[in-house]
Amino acid sequence: MARYERLRKAFQYIGPPAPQNYGAQPISDLEFLSSKPSLLRTLLLVHEYLVVKRRRGFTYNGIKAYAAQKGVYREFTDRTLDRSIRKLAELGFLDRIHPRDNKKKVIFIPTERFWRVIEEREGLIDDG
């Protein structure tokens, strides 16, 4: 037991606490998405879909049909679109809703974080 106490004291850090972010500046969600072009393109496609179709949410099939109609598949495939939508949901930009009547169907609804990114981007575009 004494040996354990000596080891614990030997490795005990004495001094000021280390900064949690190690001096890195926090970045906004828009900056984060700008570093990942496929996620940003998917986010903008989802926003355009919701505005044009006047809907609050979307499904995989709905957004795929809209992307095919727009000719987006020249830029990336439907699998890339699926992956990007899932990643946006993991990051908290979209909420997943499973209707009670159909377990396989998934409805994605944008979160407040999603709308903040859209507002921030539109603010940058308006300012020139």
Image (spheres, grey):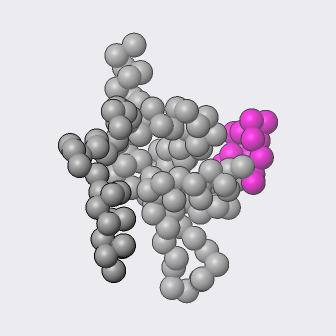
Q: Against 75, is 97 above or below?
A: below
Quarter the N terminus occupies: bottom left
> 9 left or right of 108?
left
Query: Hey, which residue is sitting farthest left in the picture?
Result: 16
- Asked if the magenta segment contains residue 32, the reply would be no
Which x, y percent locates residue 26?
A: 35, 36
Q: Residue at x 64, y 61 (%)?
A: 60
In the image, residue 123 above or below residue 29? above
Frontmost residue, 29 versus 111: 29
Q: Nearer the viewer, residue 55 or 16?
A: 16
Q: Residue at x 71, y 39 (%)?
A: 72
Residue 91 picture location, percent across and down: 48, 54
Q: On the picture, is 57 further left or further right than 4?
A: right
Residue pictured at 68% horizontal, 50% vertical: 81
Q: Which residues are magenta?
A: 65-79
**Quarter of the rendering containing residue 109:** bottom left
Residue 93 higher or lower than 95, as above or below: above
Q: Quadrant of the C terminus?
A: top left
Magenta residue check for 77: yes
* Percent coordinates x, y for residue 74 in the rendering: 79, 36
State the image coordinates of residue 103 (x, y, percent, origin top left). 60, 82
